[in-house]
């Protein structure tokens, strides 16, 4: 990410607040087109939820990035959540593919949710990503997303 050091400016980590993060793959490689590899990434989201580190609101795993909306709980800081997510998903994918090295860009974008309207708007934005990208015509056709508001 060009000027990625600017992403850290003003970054806040507050327990019980809601965040949206975006993490891109290294060199924007389309890594998440197979079900097996996508499942490795999605499993790490739910591992952090099962550890009671976050409460996932919504996510979409696109071919070269992820948007993830969650409530930060008290176990880890925002930076620690991202470090764990990126590290664990990298290890899992590398073990599966018999490769080495990072799969993610070094930094990430975060947005702290301001209010309930922002929370819902961000969830809608996240879920609609495959539609806007022209990958599918109906979100039901895309397998790599979830949202607590759309069950």
Image (tube, helix red, strand yellow):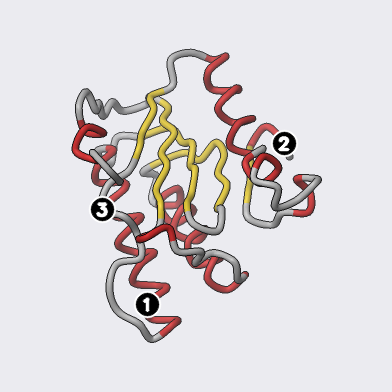
According to the image, label 3 marks what residue?
106
In the image, taking residue 12 as reference, residue 91 lies left or right, namely right
**Please, what secondary structure does the residue beneath circle 1 have?**
helix
Q: Name the secondary structure under disc 2.
A: helix
- Label 2 crowd bin: few (<14), some (14–19), many (20+), radius 10 Å: few
**Label at residue 15:** none
Residue 108's image quarter? Answer: top left
The number of numbered discs placed on residues in the rendered structure image is 3
- Tell which circle, 1 or 2, labels the residue nearer the N-terminal end: 1
Residue at the limit of the structure toward the front, as seen here:
2
Q: Residue at x 31, y 48 (%)?
A: 82
Q: Position of residue 63 (x, y in %)?
A: 55, 58
Up-down relation of residue 116 to residue 8 (above or below): above
- The location of residue 88, given as percent across then percent down, is 34, 64
Residue 99 shown left or right of residue 122 in the figure:
left
Query: Dot 3, how many residues are within 10 Å of its Cα: few (below 14), some (14-19), or many (20+)?
Result: some
Q: What residue is pinned by disc 2?
A: 150
Mark in the foreground, 2 or 3: 3
**Residue 148 in which image quadrant:** top right
Q: Of the residues tagged 1 and 2, which is closer to the observer?
A: 1
Residue 32 image point, x, y percent: 54, 64
Provide residue 25's location: percent of width, then percent of height. 40, 58
* Residue sitting at x 47%, y 38%: 55
Relative horizontal placement of residue 100, taking residue 54 as reference (left or right): left
Q: Secondary structure at mark 3?
A: loop
C-alpha separation, residue under disc 1 versus residue under disc 3 = 17 Å
State the mark number for residue 94: 1
Q: CA distance from mark 1 to mark 2?
A: 32 Å
């Amino acid at each position: 990410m060009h000027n990625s050091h600017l992403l850290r400016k003003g970054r806040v980590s507050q327990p019980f607040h809601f965040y949206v993060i975006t993490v891109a793959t290294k060199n924007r490689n389309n890594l998440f087109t197979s079900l097996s590899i996508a499942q490795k990434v999605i499993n790490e989201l739910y591992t952090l939820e099962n550890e009671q580190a976050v409460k996932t609101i919504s996510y979409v795993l696109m071919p070269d990035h992820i948007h993830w909306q969650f409530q930060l709980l008290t176990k880890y800081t925002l930076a620690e959540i991202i470090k764990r997510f990126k590290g664990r998903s990298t290890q899992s994918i590398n073990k599966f593919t018999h490769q080495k090295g990072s799969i993610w860009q070094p930094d990430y974008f975060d947005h702290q949710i301001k209010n309930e309207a922002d929370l819902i708007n961000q969830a809608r934005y996240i879920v609609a990503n495959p539609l806007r990208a022209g990958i599918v015509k109906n979100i039901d056709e895309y397998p790599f997303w979830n949202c607590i508001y759309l069950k």
